[in-house]
Image (spheres, rainbow, N blue to C red):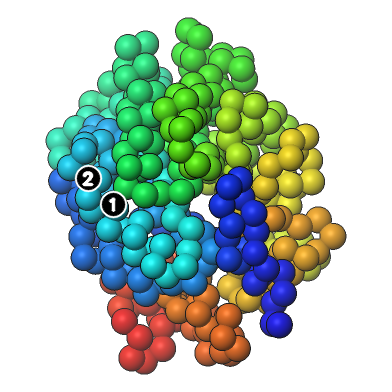
Amino acid sequence: MQYPMLQSPFVLGSLVLPNRLVMPPLVIWKSDCSGLVTDDHLSHYAASAGPGLMIVEATCVAPDGKLTDRQLGIYEDTHVPGLRRLSEQIHSQGSVAGIQLHHAGAKTDLQKNCGHPPRVVSVTDKTPAGSLELTEADIELIINQFADAAERAVAAGFDVLEIHGAHGYLGSQFLSPAHNFRKDRWGGSLENRSRFLVEVIKAVSSRVADSKAVISCRLGVADSGLPYADGLKAAETFIDAGVQLLNISTAGGRAPALADTQDGFSPIMQLGFDVRRDINRAVPVIGVGNIKTPQEADLALSRDEPVDLVAIGRAILADPAWAQKAFNHQSEMISLCINCRPCFHYTKPQKCPARKSGEA
């Protein structure tokens, strides 16, 4: 068998992933102010079949927490039927279906969020104009909105519920000493800055306790001024609160300062290796970061300090059939991502220069 680690099944709670490849949540901006699933979403996930776990893109838990007006929503019951079609599409392909629950916080764009102003952890001279600082009541409301969203996700048939705590969005903003200047129980010490995500995790876990859903956390262990040691400690706190899977990433901080590893992995991928090695809890870790080939993915799972699951992001945007080709002895036919900055896929997927002639 080619790529034996990558193709090996993986037990995740009560779930069995058919392989160790993960499609991470990558937004494609195909909705509108309604937040509803469209045929474009169904086509996108159908074309990307093959990963053992497919995590649907950042899906907003509140209408005033969107990143843009084209983001998927899960803040109303009317979203459930479309999301159910999406989970059924993923299941029909043999994959486990995950969904990422998201709130943009200060990254909400007033001009691109259907008129909603940004809701921020702390108002500073760097927060967007018109931002509203969250009150205690606002925070409690958002925690409940995450729990409501989790309940809808289970009703829609999703198996893995991922709480977004990375990339400078709301959970990351609470955790970061560079963004959180609050003087109440939600700011100051690491314990206080971790409190928001802890309460979200507890609320989500409690709300779906009667289901078999696995709770994941996308965590930036070195995001926005957060020291790695603090990120690791926060991760352990989140596991104690109910997280069963860690999806390690970053949007700044320690990772960019690192060199590639001796075996060629990116600094962000190195964070996944480090957390898997250093975490004092028996929880699986997803690693991500510029993996382009099946050989690299298999090595990330089999090296001396591995991760448990490996996610490919832009590589699957460059070639949606990446997994199908990798698992059917057609690796040489994969159209490899060439690291465009910015990524062409987010505006004109058909213009992605990595895609070969005839690929849509």
Residue at point 24%, 66% (across, down): 40
Q: Is 176 on the left or on the right of 359, as rendered?
A: right
SS type, badge 2: helix
Q: Amino acid at mark 1?
A: Leu
In three-dimensional space, the C-alpha distance between marks 1 and 2, rounded to whole angstroms, equals 6 Å
Position in image of residue 322 (x %, y %): 50, 77
Identify the residue at the far front of this view.
Answer: 210
Residue at x 40% of width, y 20% of height: 122
Name the residue beneath numbered marker 1: 83
The residue lying at 76 percent from left, 61 percent from top is: 261
Identify the secondary structure beneath mark 1. Answer: helix
Q: Residue furthest right?
A: 304
46 and 172: which is toward the camera: 46
Disc 2 marks which residue? 79
> Marks 2 and 1: in contact by CB < 8 Å?
yes
Q: Amino acid at mark 2?
A: His
Q: Quadrant of residue 246?
A: top right
Q: Is residue 45 left or right of residue 272?
A: left
The quadrant of the image that shows the C terminus is bottom left
Front residue (pair 77, 44):
77
Question: Is residue 354 in sight in this rendering?
Answer: yes
The correct choice, above or below, for 293 with respect to 80 in the image is below
Between 168 and 144, which is closer to the camera in this rendering?
A: 144
Identify the residue shown where x is 40% and y is 49%.
158
Residue at the top extreme, as displayed: 184
In terms of image quadrants, where is residue 46? Answer: bottom left
Percent coordinates x, y for residue 278 in the rendering: 78, 40
